[in-house]
Amino acid sequence: FGGLLAEFDQRLPFELTKGQREVGDEIAADLALEHPMHRLLQGDVGAGKTVVALRAMLQVVDGGGQAALLAPTEVLAQQHYRSITGMLGDLAQAGQLGGAEHATRVALLTGSQGAKARKAALLDAASGAAGIVVGTHALLQESVQFADLGLIVVDEQHRFGVEQRDALREKSGGGRPHVLVMTATPIPRTVAMTVFGDLETSVLGQLPAGRSKIDTHVVPPERPAFLARTWERIREEAAQGRQIYIVCPRIGEQEGDEGDAVPADEGERDRRSPLGIMELLPRLEELLSGLRIGVLHGKLHPDEKDAVMRRFTEGELDVLLATTVIEVGVDVPNATVMVIMDADRFGVSQLHQLRGRVGRGSLHGLCLLVTDAEPESKARERLDAVASTTDGFKLSRLDLEQRREGDVLGAAQAGRASSLRLLTLQKDEDVIRDAREEASALVEADPDLADHPGLATVLDSLLDEDRAGFLEKA
């Protein structure tokens, strides 16, 4: 492949890590094959997954196809769009004055776009003028068509259902496109898929140069002085010109709004409702008087969200009080402290993602997990585990132990309904791996199971149409 990818690589202002190069080679080899790739790119928060994905997209564009990047939120889709067009520069300006010789176009498609921008993006996607189309769930709508969709990159895979991912795959016309799924902490279902081998896995182990370490501490109910110290610490950081995130589980205007947090643990059902940012705001205005506080949540108009995020990015705000809309992708190198209120109301992967918003520059990051969960409780175990490691794979294992793997033949992404009997993913990985190898060998030798009628009958009863559909899609 010449053209865009070669030009992009030549201009990169930094050196790719050894891991990025190796994973890039794996993906490039997959993209050159006839059958579609289905690969999981596991890179811890900040490991540089976006550059790897962009290089794969450019390879597909060089081959005459298009690539779509599906992001879970508008904030993240816009951030991806800005970062991709920024990295490409004049390589993203096909048909414009100053566009490079091998240039393409990058289109952005989100639900809140004005009619004119939306029409232009739809036209660019359908005509093939846009080699790369970045978008949210809006990409799944019927009105969105592609000229030749060759690669789908799904960011933060656990935010999309199996059905939604498949809806985008169907847009490729004749052939099935390659799929690259990116995540910083696989949720249990994804770990299950990985163990079963339905996804080829690439791991970006090392962080690029310039990333700083993040210290994480639990701020527990039995140590009230720790909470007082939290507010002091925020003031100290702000006095040095640094910025702070404070995250709550919900907005707080009414019950159940933007409730992205995990359900209460067994035996804790009667606890108070999770803290909302609108409840905390008046307290913060007292505790942190004099600091400039901005508020960000999913119910704000997209223009307001953008304006708040831009003010924070440009250093006009000291503190950003937010819900989990900032969980992924937000990149402010000057932000050093992440305070998560009611931290026990979040899942392990969410906490890990949120923590990844700090320590993104040369300054060390600090993450404080504020909780009223009692020592020895399951919730505290989760928080202590998050505080003890920044390794995403270790945390996903813990998540798997605590939440189980979900039904691998159904829609449940996680939870109590495992379809497995007599074995668990954690302890029996070797049995599952051996069984998969045996099954592959048997199917290769006897695809219709003509010599194994008993096995064929059992399979028929197990794999009804719905379940077979989920296997195909997942």
Image (cartoon, rainbow, N blue to C red):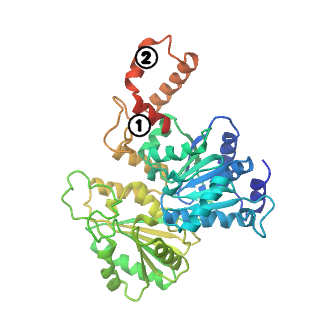
Q: Residue 244 appears in which quarter of the rendering? A: bottom left
- Residue 162 is tagged as none
Above-or-below relation of 440 to 255: above
Q: Residue 132 appears in which quarter of the rendering? A: bottom right
Which of pointers 1 and 2 lies earlier in the amino acid sequence?
1
Q: Residue 79 appears in which quarter of the rendering? A: bottom right
- On the image, the x and y values in percent for residue 269 come to 20, 56
Task: Name the residue nearer the viewer: 27 or 450.
Answer: 450
Residue 52 visible to an observer of this rendering: no
- On the image, the x and y values in percent for residue 73 come to 48, 61
Q: Would you say 406 lies left or right of 243 here?
A: left
Q: Residues within 10 Å of mark 1 (few under 14, many from 20)?
A: many
Q: Amino acid at mark 1?
A: Val
Task: Name the residue nearer the viewer: 226 or 200.
Answer: 200
The residue wearing badge 2 is 455
- Residue 408 is tagged as 1
**CB atoms of marks 1 and 2 within 8 Å:** no
- On the image, the x and y values in percent for residue 314 come to 56, 79
